Structures are given as C-alpha cells and as structure tokens.
Amino acid sequence: MSDKNYSFFGAVERSFDKAAKFTKWDSGLLNQIRQCNSVLQLRFPIKRDNGEIEVIEAYRVQHSHHKTPCKGGIRFAAEVNQDEVMALAALMTYKCTIVNVPFGGGKGGIKIDPKKYSVGELERITRRYTSELIKKNFIGPGIDVPAPDYGTGEREMSWVLDTYVSMRPGEVDAAGCVTGKPITQGGVRGRREATGLGVFYGTREVCNIPDIMSKLGLSIGIENKRVIVQGLGNVGYWAAHFFQHAGAKVIALAEYEGAIFDEYGLDIEAVFQHRKKTGSILNFPGAKDIKNSNEALELECDILIPAALENVINGENAPRIKAKIIGEGANGPLTPEADDYFAKNGTIVIPDMYLNAGGVTVSYFEWLKNLSHVRYGRMEKRFTENVNSSILNQIEELTGKKSNAQARELIMHGPDEVALVYSGLEETMINATHEIMKVWKENPAIPDMRTAAYVVAINKVATIYAELGIFP
Ligand code: NAD
C-alpha cells in the first residue's frame, strides 16, 4: 500500500473529516474548528560563534482560540516547516480537549538541527525567538504558553522565561508564560517524566479493558507484556522506564544510530547510561545489535511505542508490524494509510492526541501552580499527616495492636507535590480512556480509537461554540 502525498496537516485534516461524519455539527462549524486561527512566520538573524550572520526560520501557530491561553511545545528540528507546526498545533487543540485541559492548541518550531549549534548559539536563538513572540503578542500566561517538544527541554524553557521576565518587568504571573521549566524557576515536580508516564498510564488502562484484550488474544494488564520503544528521548525514555517498573519486558529500544534487542528485557537506566558514555545505543552488554533501526519496529511484540518523530509507520512498513497494540508516544508517527491498515487487521492504535497528553496535563498543573504562587501540597501535607496520625493512634489504642513501621509510614504520609501530580495525571488518563472507549462502543461504525478520540474532541469544541451562540 503506497502512501498518498498528504502533508502532515493534511493527514490531521483527513483524520478530522473521517471523525466529523460521526458528529451532528454543520460544515461551517466543523470548518471553523479544523482551521488554524493564527499563523506567525518569523525570520530573524543570529550571530554564529564564528562571527557569521545566519537567518533563522521559525513559526508559532495558534490553532484554536476557543479557549485561551493557547498551549503547545517549541520544536527544534531541521525538518520544521509551517505545515508541520500547523498540524502539531491542531493536534494540541484536540489533545487538550480530550484530557479536559482548558487551553486552545498552539505549537512553535525553529528550523535548526540543535546538534549543529553551540549552547551559546542555541541560547541566542531561543531568546531572540522569545522576544519576537513578545513583540507580536504571541506569548504570555493568558495568551500563549509554550513548553518543551522535540529537541528542547528545561534549559530552553528557562531561557524563554528569563527573556519574558526581563521584557515584562513586574508582571506578577510571568512564570506562567512557559511550562516545562526547572523546579527552581517555577517548574512542577513530575513534569519531566509526565509525557512518558501518561503514555504508560494510558496504555495500561487500555490493557485493563477485558473486551479489547480478549479480541487481541492478550492477557489483562501490563505485566510480562513485550514492549518495543523507538526513541530514547524524553518521552521514550520515561515511557520505557515506567513499563519496566510495572513488570513489562522492554525487549527492544531503537535510536537513530541503530537498535538493540534482548528477549529477557532491557534495563532502561543501564542502556541510557551506556548511550551517554559511548555515544551510541549499540554494543550494550548482553543485547543484540540491529544496525537498521527501523527493523526493530517490525519485531514480534505486544506493544510498540513509537516515541521519536512522525510518519515512521506508513503504508509501506505497516504490513510488517507485528505489535498487537501501538501506542503513539510521538506526535503523528502513523500515516493515514498505516491507520487504515491497522483498523482492518485489528491492531489497536492508541492515538497520540490522547496518549501523549501527559505532558500538557502536567503543564496545566505547572501553570496553575505559577498562577497560584504556591507549591502543591504545601498547605495540606502536614495537616493530613497530623490527622492520619491521630486516626492511627486511636485505632491502635482501641484495638491494642501496633502497626509496623512500613504500614505506619504509608498511612501517615501526606500528599507532596509529586504524588499529587502523578495522581492527577493518572486520573486524567483513566478518565480520557473511558470517555473515548464509550464513544467507540456506542458507535461500532467508528473504525478505530483515533476516530473515536477525534469525535470526543470535536463534540467538546463544537459545544463551546454552539453555547456561545456563534453557531446556533
Ligand atoms: P527528544 O528530542 O527528547 O527525543 C527524541 C528521541 O528520538 C531522540 O533521542 C532522538 O535521537 C530519537 N530519534 C530521532 N530520530 C530517530 C529515528 N529515526 N529512530 C529512532 N530514534 C530517533 O523528543 P521528545 O520530547 O521525547 O519528543 C518525541 C516525540 O514526542 C515528538 O513527536 C514530540 O512532538 C512528542 N511529544 C513530546 C512531548 C514532551 O513532553 N516532550 C509531549 C507530547 C508529545
């Protein structure tokens, strides 16, 4: 099956249209939802370390203003283009809606390969990009709030914040202009691992649904499932980490330089340290090297997590994929042709716009923390521990039995920030899974989980417009 020449945004539109048929909304309203509301194209100069001037191509897209601020990561990659940023911004609208995070979708992109720039050059690019966004009113805690994405992380977000604060002195909520910041600068505990953890929670919830698992011929739960992860970056590393710690076997890991395989399961932290030390995932002790990284996607397994880039599974390689469940850690890793193939052969594809929403969910928690200017758990942790202690003491007194130190610790423990963030994310992912599955179950003509997720998203955004009276 060959892939039609869709652009990435075209593929998102195609998925949207496929789902729109299962909704009751008129075409004008649907068209308003699918278009990008604002597209900012930027070209600005930076001075390279060798003194040369380079003109940088960059974008910020606000897909939907049905809720503000807009929200979405900033990507640094050589492949960045307007169409890609538009597609990613659109996915953010649907993603935020599905996990009930009150933002419109946005996305930023800078067309550079970050590996080819020094830290100083990256800082100059990030700061100049931020000041361009400020000049155009495309950033601010109530306007548009970027976050990390492919090729960016806490370091870049702290440059964004520092630039914003220096150009908007005295703005009390300034820390809420960007998320994914270091903890010391208003970041929230748990944000770093949030997307990977959300990928894990979402996949686990699907694996807990008896109907789905019996159709796939798999046992319920995550334990002993064979998992393959592509991309050992922020999303892939943490997803693999949580799968391993829940008792799954991560049998293969694929990076751009190659892949490694171990049927008994790889130790993720050890692989990560090996790659850090040697510069390559290959030659990991005890594992088999696979020189062509893409071949790893085609190995026998239960769960495949593509967590690198888009379009890696397409009409050409889809028939060779043996995974029973594909969890989209990355944005857009499957083309529409791959989707059609898996819908027919019964493979469950857990779609990006829901599965990798952990990042934006915890970004929402970070933004709330910034606006409230207080750490989660600060007010209630000690109070809860005191109440729990009194209850436990009473029970021990009445029963005459003492609980052991471990049980005591567990019962007394008051909620700290990371525990609250994890539980908020777990609740969000579980609820979103069941909301999507309910729509799918109620309408068996819906071909796949992605279409069901789009139906959920379209209905929620459309209801807002309808209630506003814009579209009676
Ligand atoms: P990252 O830069 O931290 O990691 C990406 C990893 O993929 C890198 O280690 C890179 O070497 C690897 N890679 C690149 N090309 C590859 C190839 N051909 N084969 C195998 N590995 C390859 O990026 P990230 O933040 O983990 O983002 C990955 C994907 O997840 C992107 O699609 C991004 O849009 C999406 N995403 C990220 C977040 C987030 O919070 N970081 C949230 C939602 C979605």
Image (spheres, rainbow, N blue to C red):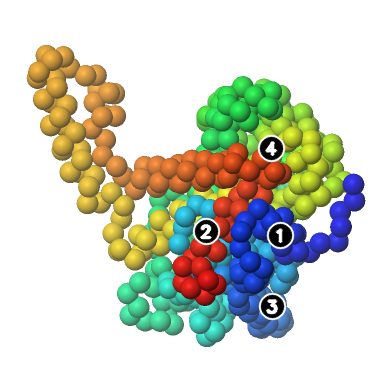
- Alpha carbon of mark 2 to alpha carbon of mark 4: how far? 24 Å
User: What is the three-letter code of the residue carrying label 3?
Assistant: Ile
User: What is the three-letter code of the residue carrying label 2?
Assistant: Lys
Q: Is mark 3 within 8 Å of ligand 1?
A: no
Residue at (65%, 81%) from the top-left corner?
42
State the SS at label 2.
helix
Give the number of the disc on residue 50: none
- Report if the CB atoms under discs 1 and 4 are less than 8 Å apart: no
Front disc: 3 or 4:
4
Q: Earlier in the sequence, mark 1 or mark 4?
A: 1
How far across and how far down the image is residue 328, in percent? Answer: 66, 46
User: What is the three-letter code of the residue carrying label 4?
Assistant: Ile
Residue placed under numbered mark 3 in the picture: 56
Residue placed under numbered mark 1 in the picture: 17
Residue at (50%, 52%) from the top-left corner?
99
State the SS at label 3.
strand
Q: Earlier in the sequence, mark 1 or mark 2?
A: 1
Q: Earlier in the sequence, mark 3 or mark 4?
A: 3
